């Protein structure tokens, strides 16, 4: 019943002279997401992007159903609709609606609340938007007993026929799906996310992709003190996040040598902050080597000892690279809701030990001044050489 899918964007429309770059990036992402799912051409026309079959035939119901979950991951799309594209001629529009209606109403209750919403960007079209709506309501009514549907002009109507009349063609659709919004991945530079098996860092990676930055990942473990399940869990999370972007690389880093050095030479209460400063240094090194322009963490202010304002500042000052914290002000329940929405919550709930639990202090300090952290680091023999060995021995997936 549908020969195209119309995709709408919102934020991209505000980009002025740069709009073409964002549109091209979105088109490329849609092509990538649909590759291997369905044959398609992705085209642009003044404020809209639409998808059609290369042979200009109708898509099957199965093909449409397969495209929907892929397009729901296309950052930059606000909404999209499977649609029938017809000539901008009222008689052609009316006939197409009448042909579509029986299949749309099939299987629905005996009485359906219904409305028409028309938009007319083609100002030479002989009917105005309200007149188009009245005409198409009459066309639908001609297909049924008048008791089959009840007119409802409000947003809670069970069925809405959308009609967009453009210069080049007109579009007719009954269903509208939500995209993730934001900006298309690749419209901003690549970043490096510090990815754990927890709830927050996968959400942070998702949110930074939503702002247009593709991401690689660096994750820390302490094998053999942490089991292989620790890294397997992170691999699974990274693979799932990669379904939203062109696949990012995962750098697996064994932090154990450094943790032992901290255990043997430094104050127990400062271990967590010292671990985190080293993690940022290692992540910065890897990011610089791989062309990433910033680091991303799942830090949320006040959530744990390392995420108090003082400790975040002390940790941050270990490096010069920009550190982005997309969930820093989020309520934990909001972060959990996002994790469920994007499909990482179930993966994060699989409980396995992580590197932060190795030699963890019983009472970590929540307020470590920078000068104290720097003095403690001077007590670690061969600090720089340890970091070099850890970076060099990482596994890249």
Image (cartoon, rainbow, N blue to C red):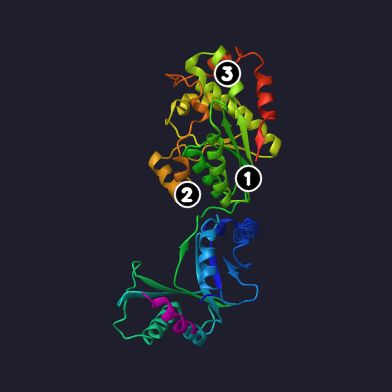
Marks 2 and 3, the one that precedes in the sequence: 3
| Circle 3 residues within 10 Å: few <14, some 14–19, many ≥20 | few
Q: Which residue is mark 3?
A: 260
Q: Position of residue 316 (x, y in %)?
A: 56, 28
Gap between marks 2 and 1, in whole Å? 18 Å
Q: Position of residue 113 (x, y in %)?
A: 32, 74
Q: Nearer the viewer, mark 3 or mark 1?
A: 3
Gap between marks 2 and 3, in whole Å? 35 Å
Q: Secondary structure at mark 3?
A: helix
Q: Position of residue 31 (x, y in %)?
A: 63, 61
Snapshot quadrant of residue 166: bottom right
Question: Image check: 174 left or right of 266?
Answer: left
Q: From where the camera sits, is residue 382 visible? A: yes
**Closer-to-camera residue (355/150):** 355
- Chain part drawn in magenta: 96-107
Gap between marks 3 and 1, in whole Å? 30 Å
Marks 2 and 1, the one that precedes in the sequence: 1
**Closer-to-camera residue (360/307):** 360
Predominant SS along the magenta part: helix
- At 56% across and 13% down in the image, what residue appears? 264
Q: Which residue is mark 1?
A: 248
Which part of the image, by quadrant, shows the C terminus?
top right
Q: Which residue is mark 2?
A: 343
């Amino acid at each position: 019943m549908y020969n195209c899918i119309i995709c709408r964007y919102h934020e991209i429309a505000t980009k002025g002279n740069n709009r073409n770059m964002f549109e091209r990036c979105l088109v490329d992402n849609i092509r990538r997401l649909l590759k291997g799912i369905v044959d398609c051409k992705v085209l642009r026309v003044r404020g809209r992007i639409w998808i059609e079959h290369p042979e200009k035939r109708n898509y099957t119901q199965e093909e449409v159903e397969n495209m929907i979950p892929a397009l729901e991951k296309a950052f930059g799309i606000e909404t999209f609709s499977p649609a029938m594209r017809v000539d901008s001629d009222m008689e052609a529009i009316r006939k197409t609606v009448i042909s579509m209606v029986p299949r749309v109403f099939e299987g629905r209750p005996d009485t359906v609340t219904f409305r028409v919403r028309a938009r007319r960007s083609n100002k030479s079209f002989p009917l105005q938007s309200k007149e188009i709506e009245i005409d198409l309501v009459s066309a639908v009514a001609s297909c049924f007993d008048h008791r089959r549907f009840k007119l409802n002009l409000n947003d809670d109507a069970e069925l809405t026929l959308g009609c967009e009349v453009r210069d080049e063609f007109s579009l007719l659709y009954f269903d509208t799906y939500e995209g993730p919004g934001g900006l298309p991945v690749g419209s901003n530079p690549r970043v490096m996310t510090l990815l754990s098996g927890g709830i927050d860092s996968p959400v942070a990676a998702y949110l930074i992709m939503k702002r247009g930055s593709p991401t690689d990942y660096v994750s820390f473990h302490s094998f053999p003190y942490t089991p292989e399940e620790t890294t397997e869990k992170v691999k699974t999370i990274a693979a799932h996040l990669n379904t939203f972007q062109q696949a990012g690389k995962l750098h697996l880093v064994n932090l154990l040598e450094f943790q032992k050095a901290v255990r043997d030479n430094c104050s127990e209460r400062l271990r967590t902050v010292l671990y985190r400063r080293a993690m940022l240094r290692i992540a910065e090194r890897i990011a610089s080597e791989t062309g990433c322009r910033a680091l991303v963490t799942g830090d949320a202010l006040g959530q744990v000892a390392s995420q108090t304002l003082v400790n975040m500042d002390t940790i941050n000052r270990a490096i010069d690279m920009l550190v982005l914290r997309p969930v820093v002000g989020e309520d934990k329940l909001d972060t959990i809701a996002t994790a469920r929405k994007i499909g990482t919550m179930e993966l994060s709930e699989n409980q396995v030990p992580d590197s932060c639990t190795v030699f963890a202090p019983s009472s970590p300090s929540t307020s470590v001044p920078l000068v104290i952290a720097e003095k403690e680091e001077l007590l670690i023999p061969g600090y720089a050489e340890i970091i070099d060995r850890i970076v060099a021995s990482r596994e890249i997936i």
